Every structure is written in C-alpha cells, then in structure tokens.
Amino acid sequence: MKTRATVPLILAAALSLAACAHKPPHGEPPPPPPPPPTETGDVPAVPLNEPPPMHLVVQARADTPIVSLRLVFHTGSIDDPKGKEGLTALTAKLMAEGGTQRLSAAQLLEALYPMAAELKVVTDKEMTTLSGRVHQDFLPAFLILFTDTLLQPRFDPAEFERLRANALNAVRNGLRSEDDETLGKVGLDALIYAGHPYAHYTGGTVQGLQSLTLEDVKAHARRVFTQDRLVIGLAGPVDANLQQTMTSRLSGLPAKGAPRVALPTVKSSAGRALILQKPTLSTAVSMGFVTPMRRGDPDFFPVAFALSNLGEHRQFIGVLFNELREKRGLNYGDYAYAEHFIEDRGNGTFNRTNLVRTQQDVSIWLRPVVPANAVFATRGAVYFLERMSNEPLSPERFDLVRGFLQGYTRLWEQTDQRRLGQAIDSLYYGTPDFLDRYRDALKTMTPESVQAAVRRQLSPEKLAFVFVTEDAQGLAQKLKSGEPSPITYASPKPPEVLKVDERIIQQKLPVRPDAVQIVPASGFMER
C-alpha cells in the first residue's frame, strides 16, 4: 500500500530566547569582529594572519621511525591570472611530478619506490601543500628529491603537455560527466563566489588550461613558490640537523613573491539557484552561503556543533542522514559543513587540512536523489536546519552529539600529517590548540547557547542552491512556483514520519523565482 502525505503545514512558533554567545576557552578575548558588510549578506575580506617567511612548525617524537614533511605555500587558484585559470595547480603538479634536473619523471618515481616514500601535492584556493613521508633510514636521499622538486624542477615539455592534458580531461570528462558530487560543489563555488577569485574550479577551466604555456608555468613558479609564502612542517624523529638542513636548502627559493591578491567583498547570493543540466539518473543538491564566521569567531564552535548534529561527512549520527536516508530512503548521503569541505583522500570521512580560506562558506550536501523527490529532499534539509533555530536540541540529543564529538575530533589529529596540517592552519587563523579548544568548548556549551548561535549565523534565508539534474526545466518550474511537493513512498511509513512530512511538503524554499538559472554542464567551467 502506498502512503501519500498531503496535509498542510502548521508552522511551529519560534521560541524567543536571549542571544547567548559562546565565550572562547582559556580566558582569552575573542578576535576583533570583521568590519560590517556593505549590504546584508555581503562578506568582506578580513586578512588572515601571516607567519614569518619559512616559519618552522616542529612536532618531534622519538617513538616513530617515520619522518613527515609538509611545505605549505600561501598560494592557490586565487593567483591564477585572468584567462589562465588552472595555472597554479598545473605549476605545482609539474614541479612535484614532472621530474628534477637530475631525474626524469619516471626516474623520480623509480627513486621513490624502494624507499616506500610518499610525495604529493594539493592546490586549493589560497594554499598549496607539498607533503612527504619517509622512513628515517632513507631521509638523506629523500630530502634531496623532495626539495629538488621545488629548487630544480625539470619543466619537461613532454610532462607539461601530459599533465595539462590530464587537467583538461579532469574538467571535460571527470567534472562535467562523471562526478556529480564534485560538479555540484564546484557549481556552488561558482554561484556563491560569483565575480570573486574563488569562483573558478581550482583545477582550471578549459580555455584557461588551453592558453597555458611552459613559459607561463616557469614564470609563475618564481612568483608564488617563494620563501615569504612558505611554512615548513616537520614531524617524527626531528632533530636540529634536519631543521637546519630544510631551512638551508629551501633558502634557495626566491626570497619574495608577487604581491598578495586583494580579495574583494563577496556579494550575497541569497535566494539564487543554479541548475546544471546533464544526462543523469539522479539529482545532486548542494546549498550554502559565504559567511564572515571562521575559526576564532565566538560562534564557530557552537555552529560547528549544530552542523555536526545535522550531519558529519559519512557519519551515521546526523539528523539529515537519519531523517532523509534512513527513515525515508531518499538517497545515499546527507551532510553539513561549518567550513569548506574537501574530502581527505587518505581518509574519506575527514576534511583536508590546509584549506585555509579568508572567506569561508557553510554548506549542505544531498546526493543522489530520485529527480521526482529532489524538491522534497531539499525542503527537508531546509526544514531540519530551520528547526535548530526554532527549538533547542533535547538534552538527550545534545549529550549524544557532544559525546560523539569529544571522541571524533581526536581522529582529526591521529596522524603526523594531520597534526602538522592542523598546527599550520592555526597559524593563519590565530587559533592555537584549535582541537583542544573545541573539546573545552564542548564542556561549556548548552542546547540554548547552540540555538542562539544558529539563530545568529545559520538563517535559511541566506542559502543559495545548486542542482545537477537532467530535467532542468521541470525542476526550475517547481522551484519558481513554490507549490507544495508531496511525496509517494513505495512502502508504508510510520505516522510520526508522515506527520513531519506534512511540514516538509509545505516548507518554504528561499529561492527567488527571478534568480533561477539553467546552465548545460557540457559548457560549465569552459572559461
């Protein structure tokens, strides 16, 4: 027997509670607030802290033979010149993987293989990280290889062409055709950061990559991979000799780089919707907004708590996961993020470190949803987000999430690479002992203080939406009409689920009918 929920919504009255800002632990005053936005929802750029050139972060421990190295440069896709989108990522990739003056790319791999050594590079909007990991027995030889990728890159024309072709393929076939999850997230960047250096895909655009030359890469390396942009992280059996060797060798980098890119104010994208149309059996949903709140803000910890309650990445405890997936069988994953999230490939549940951003974003991700249920699922996410503003968490739910986070946050620092990454992030955000402070804050939070922070920071009216779907016109019409979105289940649902459905069906989506745009995915990130 099929069950159909159609009863009109009875809105719950909002509770009137006094704002109760969470105070930072350790008795330290909060950082100064950012300057007021020029318009409601606009987010100005408040500069990050800048460590001194080649600042050393050392986490020495004698109980491991593995040395971890992490070189974090304050450069990313924001440094890509207009029309050459993808230059920073391609430059970093060619330096790390394209060989050195002494070794070709193939010979570099052959040299690393018997060491069982790790050498990889990741580029984001503002940070590029070269990381390495090796047994201390191979450290002297590895250090030469590791630093030579920066000091004596080969800049092989054949490797340049190979890696540029890979980057183009990643946009044309990976992003546009195969990976709806990443496509939705990149689409959200393009929507909420429109006209801003964050807007384009870190890996580049088709026309941007096609315009690049090997000379562009060589010149860019001299501009941005410089001493004044570098933080050096070392962990494991680290002694004074290793520290001296690293700083001495890396002093061969250019001392000063190009001036920092001046980031503009991000204009509010509230109520906008972008529909990326492509042949696909499901609909992917991403929603979010740019926020002036970042680590160090008094509201950051309670907001992070609230969004963990909605759903940590690939964890089963979240409200969205249980309500949309488990109870209603709508999709696979439903998660929420207090700052920009990119999955750590070393562990698919954690956010990468060294994604430091001057202007952060809050987001919610739903995927994959049967197209007929896409609007209902989107309304469900907005409903459960809004409910945290209307009523505090129950004591039982609050204690469950707090207990989970007390343990789960320790997994975020379980490896030397992750601990180094966290420590380097803290330099830029001005948040020393960040995870210890989070666990301290958990002890003093209350359901009411979390609710107050949610009210200040997480209004659904700020949201913008991105959908990846096939029937773009049909979805656009549903969004513009604002009509209820009843749902039909293949099997009976409990009365308590259907009662909540009555509210979800009528939940207001903060989408402006005049701000719904359809873009073919086949042309997305073309230029």
Image (cartoon, grey):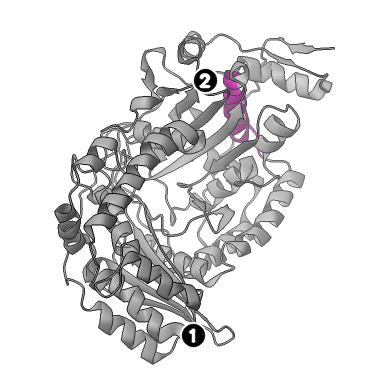
**Do we see residue 69 in this rendering?**
no
Question: Which mark identifies residue 509?
Answer: 2
Q: Percent x, y for residue 203?
A: 34, 45
Identify the main secondary structure in magenta: helix
Query: At label 1, which amino acid type do we have?
Result: Gln
Return the residue at label 1.
136
**Do we see residue 123 in this rendering?**
yes
Q: Nearer the viewer, residue 467 or 192?
A: 467
Q: Percent x, y for residue 28?
A: 45, 66
Q: Secondary structure at mark 2?
A: loop
Instruction: Using residue 250 as the reference point, say whether residue 242 is left or right of it.
Output: right
Q: Percent x, y for residue 190?
A: 35, 34
Residue 52 drawn above or below residue 60:
above
Q: What is the magenta range?
A: 374-392
Do the numbered discs 2 and 1 sit on residues whose CB atoms are within 8 Å? no
Which picture quadrant has residue 149?
bottom left
